[in-house]
Image: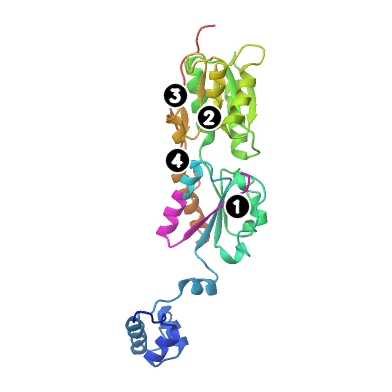
Amino acid sequence: MAPGSTRPTSRDVAQAAGVSQAAVSLVLGDKWRGRVSETTAERVRQAARDLGYRPNLAARNLRLGHTRTVLLVVPALTTEFFAGVYTGAARIAAQHGFGVVLYPSPEGIGPARDPFASAQAALDGVIASSMAADALTAIRGDQLPLVMLDSDPTGSHGAATVNLDITDGIRQVTDHLLTLGHRRFLHLAADIASWTFEVRAHELAARLAQVPGTSLITAGAPISIDDARTAAETALSAPGPRPTAVICDDDKLAAGAYKAARRLGLRIPDDLSVTGLDDLALATAIDPELTTVRLDAELFGERGMQALLAVLEGRQPEGSDIPVELVVRGSTAPPSAP
């Protein structure tokens, strides 16, 4: 094409090849066999090459009812964890010719405005965190092929669920602290109504109930460092024997527990052991570095996208939970003598 010339159309190709536009569509859509001759097909292909014609794939996909676009609904963009989930999902999507639109639910949870005039017309499927599940109704994403992340597999509305093995993560943390000799625990819990946090609380209580002489108190807080500091400071200052270990639902909550300990004159890990969950960059930025459970966010996103592709192709997605790993650092040690 000459500089400044308009982009060639299928009509231009038809005129150059001496055929109808319908014939051009058949040939370039690879549906010509048995409908036009091989000689005609080659003439159309040559005309397209000569003109530098490229089909409008977006328009073609819309006509076929497929946009090869997936919506990833997450609770917020304020944590690197969900950035990792997006990175993993987008990597697998790109390998299969799909794009991923990232959509955060306002305020972390709750309803969201429809980002499209009609999600059903603009999307092929949805991947959603259970923390943002309420947003699905507003965008009508629950009427599309749906994969839920961090969701109860027995009650999910999705065609598939993909979960990290959070139960095992809590088990690893608890057993680590029990082995060190801790018996008095504070659970600094995320104050969010979500299946994944319910699992953490249930598993922690169940594990400690099996060990005589243990005690557990729970303090809830939104996932922010300041809110966690306030909740932890209040719990650690309460009358009675002080907990010797704090198990946090999130690394940000653990950072708040660090600040509470400092305000109370407690040393970590000498007077108080603290654990987190996520293994964010924050875990190695605080001092001492945080013992936490590593969650592979990118693998989580990859598996979510692979599950959605399986659903779209009518296959059964892989069903096993993604393993997690306890990373022991300097924030945990045996409790000091009374």
- Badge 1 marks a residue whose secondary structure is loop
Mark 3 vs 1, N-terminal side: 1
Task: Indicate the quadrant where residue 237 lies.
Answer: top right
Q: Nearer the viewer, mark 3 or mark 1?
A: 3
Task: Where is residue 130? Give x, y as percent.
Answer: 60, 45
Q: Amino acid at mark 1?
A: Gly
Task: Indicate the quadrant where residue 249 lies.
Answer: top right
Reading the image, the residue beneath label 2 is 170
Q: Is any atom of residue 216 visible in this view?
A: no
Task: Where is residue 232? Give x, y as percent.
Answer: 60, 23
Q: For the residue carrying disc 2, how many other residues have a C-alpha within 10 Å: few (<14), some (14-19), or many (20+)?
A: many
Q: Is residue 294 above or below residue 27?
A: above
**Does the stretch in magenta take in 99?**
yes
- Mark number displayed over residue 287: 3
Residues at discs 1 and 4 in contact (Cβ within 8 Å): no
Q: Which residues are magenta?
A: 87-108
Report, in whole angstroms, how far the alpha carbon at label 2 lies from the one at label 3: 23 Å
Q: For the residue carrying disc 3, how many other residues have a C-alpha within 10 Å: few (<14), some (14-19), or many (20+)?
A: few
Reading the image, the residue beneath label 4 is 296
Q: Residue at (63%, 40%) from the top-left corner?
A: 194
Q: For the residue carrying disc 4, how many other residues have a C-alpha within 10 Å: few (<14), some (14-19), or many (20+)?
A: some
Q: Amino acid at mark 2?
A: Ile
Report, in whole angstroms, how far the alpha carbon at label 1 lies from the one at label 4: 22 Å
